[in-house]
Amino acid sequence: QVQLVESGGGLVQPGGSLRLSCAASRNIFTFDAMGWYRQAPGKQRELVARITSGGRRNYADFVKGRFTISRDNAKNTVTLQMNSLEPEDTAVYYCNAQVTPTINYWGQGTQVTVSS
């Protein structure tokens, strides 16, 4: 079992920045991947960014170089630095731990609202 706790969400103006953090209850070093997903009202959950145990990063097209995902295996954390935020980025952001291809855990989510 893995517990994931997200933090760092909130209200920010367009063009602003937020940094999301996810703390895992277990050592993430052996996990296949860690990632961030988001879900806006009325929409399906979608991948934002993902980083594998080997450090390979994948980003959704809509990120457009604005977001950066990183992981700290020593601290069992994964972070998502979000810059140049747009109103369309408003959503609940979820941390995901892919322990194996068939075992996934999710955090409770953190709200990100981009509005003037």
Image: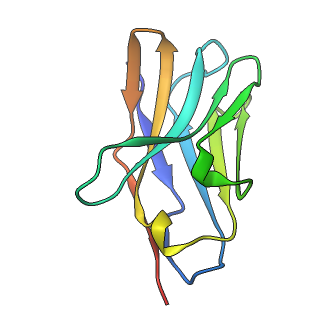
Pinpoint residue 105: horizontal percent, then vertical percent: 39, 26
Color theme of the render: rainbow
Query: At 71% across and 31% down in the image, what residue appears?
Result: 57
Q: Taking 76 as reference, is 84 above or below it? A: below
Residue placed most toward the observer, 34 or 27: 34
Which percent across, then down, holds residue 13? 56, 84
Q: Kindly identify the residue that appears in the image at 39 percent across and 13 percent down.
A: 103
57, 76: nearer the viewer = 57
Of residues 2 and 49, the one nearer the viewer is 49
State how many labels appear. 0
Q: Is residue 21 left or right of residue 5?
A: right
Q: Is residue 76 above or below residue 30?
A: below
- Of residue 44 and residue 80, the one placed in the foreground of this image is 44
Above/below status of 77 relative to 116: above
**Lateral position of residue 70 relative to residue 20, left or right:** right
Q: Dividing the image into 4 quarters, which one contains the N terminus?
A: top left
Residue at (33%, 58%) from the top-left corner?
A: 40
> Most extreme residue toward the bottom, as rendered?
116
- Residue 99 in picture, x, y percent from top left: 50, 14
Q: Residue furthest left?
A: 42
Q: Quick check: 114 above or below 104?
A: below
Name the image quarter holding residue 104. Answer: top left
Q: Would you identify the image quadrant in which residue 64 lies?
A: bottom right
Q: Residue at x 35, y 43 (%)?
A: 45
Where is residue 111? Give x, y as percent.
39, 63
